[in-house]
Image (cartoon, helix red, strand yellow):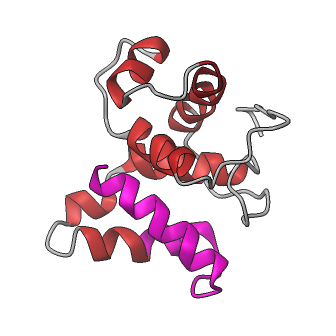
Amino acid sequence: MNKYGKSALCAVKSIMEKRASSPVEAWGFAVKSYFPNSVSGQEKGCPKGAFLGLCENGNVKGVPKGNYTKSRLNKGYALQALPLLIQNPNQTEKELWEQISSKNYNHQMGVVLALFNEGFLEIEPLSINSRS
């Protein structure tokens, strides 16, 4: 599991334990702990957009639907991965990404897989609305 996947898990746990008041705040705390000496690592938008997009759509357990991100692309990528994981839960980040996009991969699937593998994703019934 990469550091962005670990950040996503840390963020969800901090929300559940009421140590963060929002997914945005939780993500900020989490990436600072996993990337303490890398501002670029802390500010990387693609994994953040994937995490916040899943939260925004109501797919992360313990996190209410809301308006958490302006990222439509990365939110969309994360949401597109959910039915693919239902079909085949043993996929790698690369395998998932290749089914979703031909663009350069930037850790979005690491976030999705970490949350999925740890049981933090609500995917039944699958509600995918990438425009919300």
Q: Is residue 23 left or right of residue 33?
A: right
| Rendered position, 7 above or below 124 | below
Residue 8 forms part of the magenta stretch: yes
Q: Pick the residue in front: 28 or 59.
A: 59
* Quarter in which the C terminus is drawn: top right
> Residue 123 in the image: x percent, y percent?
74, 39
Residue 19 forms part of the magenta stretch: yes
Q: Write the residue at 51% across / 46% down.
A: 117
| Rendered position, 111 above or below 20 | above
Q: Is residue 85 left or right of residue 96?
A: right
| Rendered position, 24 above or below 108 | below
List the single residue furthest toward the bottom.
19
Q: Quadrant of residue 62?
A: bottom right
In the image, the segment drawn in magenta is: 1-28
Q: Is residue 125 left or right of residue 22?
A: right
Magenta portion: prevailing SS class: helix
> Residue 43 in the image: x percent, y percent?
32, 59
Q: Quadrant of residue 4?
A: bottom left
List the single residue furthest toward the right.
125
> Residue 65 in the image: x percent, y percent?
79, 56
Query: What is the total number of numbered labels drawn onto the structure image?
Result: 0
> Residue 50 in the image: x percent, y percent?
51, 44
Q: Write the residue at 58% across / 38% down.
A: 75
| Rendered position, 6 above or below 104 | below
Q: Quadrant of residue 28?
A: bottom left
Q: Write the residue at 54% across / 29% down.
A: 89
